[in-house]
Amino acid sequence: MNPLQRQLRRWCVLLVLLGVAGLAGSASAAEKSTLIQGLAKAAETATAAGDFARAGDLYLEIWHADGTQQVALYNAARAHQLAGKKDQAITEFRELLALEKLDPALKKKGDKQMAVLVPPSKAEASAEVARKAAAERLAAESVAAEKARVEKAASERAAAQKAEAERAAASQAAADRVMAEQAEAERLAVARKARSRPKAPVVVKESPVDQPSSGAVPWLVTGGVAVVAALAVGVWAQTDASELSQDLGVTSGGYISGTNYNEAKGRIASIDTRAYVAGGLGAVGVALAVVGVVKGATGKQVALTPSMDGRGMVAAWRF
């Protein structure tokens, strides 16, 4: 037999052995599944009958047959707990909680049952309270530290902004000062140039001087206005005097019916006052007109003053 044939023979034998091993493994897995199903059915029957000790033992056999059946170990511990086998239940719960890849739901249930089976001592309770208090204290300190950090950052930021604003204001003030100094220097330079520049001589030109007017017109106009006003006031007084004369007329019965004594006295005083005013205005108007005529005729200056007795006006002019 050549080497190639011997190698082929070896491969055939290996394949046969692997096939036999696979069939054996399949048979073993099928038997285990059948066994587990039977144990699970028997455990359910015992639980329904209230035989929790028997049910716990059956669930424990399932766990020993298949180490992946974590629920079976929990059921075994719970059934032994209900059967009153406290120590065995505690041992099985501890075994369950010690598993590395324990289902979180089973861990939560196991912790709950262990708390019932093995209640924490006073020392453990005090330690738990202290642990919680320490955790709360650490959380409060962390919050306070974070608050202080935020406040410090805000304060530093505000201080930096204030310093930046002060620097900007100082820079602006310096720039304004420089600009003012430059403007002042330019103004002084312009002033120096203006002082150093020779001034052109001022030439005064001769201008003709007109002969001033005699000024007679204002006097004549003012005198005329005064005379017109005197006439108006005189007419007004004369009209009131006529009306008063009619009111003072005696009726056929010998009585004055148009006015009374006091009213007549007041009206007479008013008429007299207007007569004096009219006379004064007339005198002033005539005097002003005379001054105007003289100034127009002679071109001389004329002075107009009251008379010594205060009853008239005196006009004087220089010849």
Image: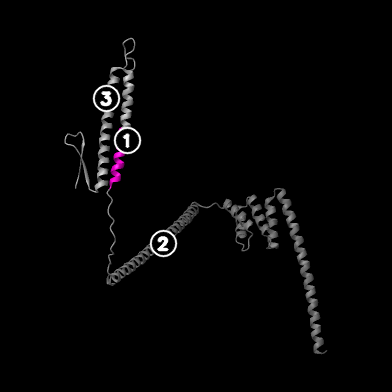
| Amino acid at pointer 1 | Val
Proximity of marks 2 and 3: CB atoms separated by less than 8 Å: no
Residue 239's x, y, as percent?
33, 25
The residue type indicated by label 3 comes to Ala
Q: CA distance from mark 2 to mark 3?
A: 90 Å
Look at discs 1 and 3 and give the one toward the viewer.
Answer: 1
Residue shown at the point (80%, 80%) measured from the top left: 13
Name, please, the residue furthest toward the top: 253
Task: Give the dominant element type of the magenta stretch: helix, strand or loop.
Answer: helix
Q: Where does label 2 land, which residue?
A: 161
Q: Mark 1 to mark 3: distance in Å?
A: 23 Å
Q: Earlier in the sequence, mark 1 or mark 3?
A: 1
Residue under label 3, please give it.
269
From what the image shows, is residue 110 above or below residue 282?
below
Q: Which residues are drawn in magenta?
A: 215-230
Q: Nearer the viewer, residue 250 or 268?
A: 250
The disc at residue 228 is 1
Front in this rendered view, residue 53 or 78 = 78
Residue 229: quadrant of the picture? top left
- Between the residue at mark 2 and the residue at mark 1, the CA separation in whole angstroms equals 86 Å
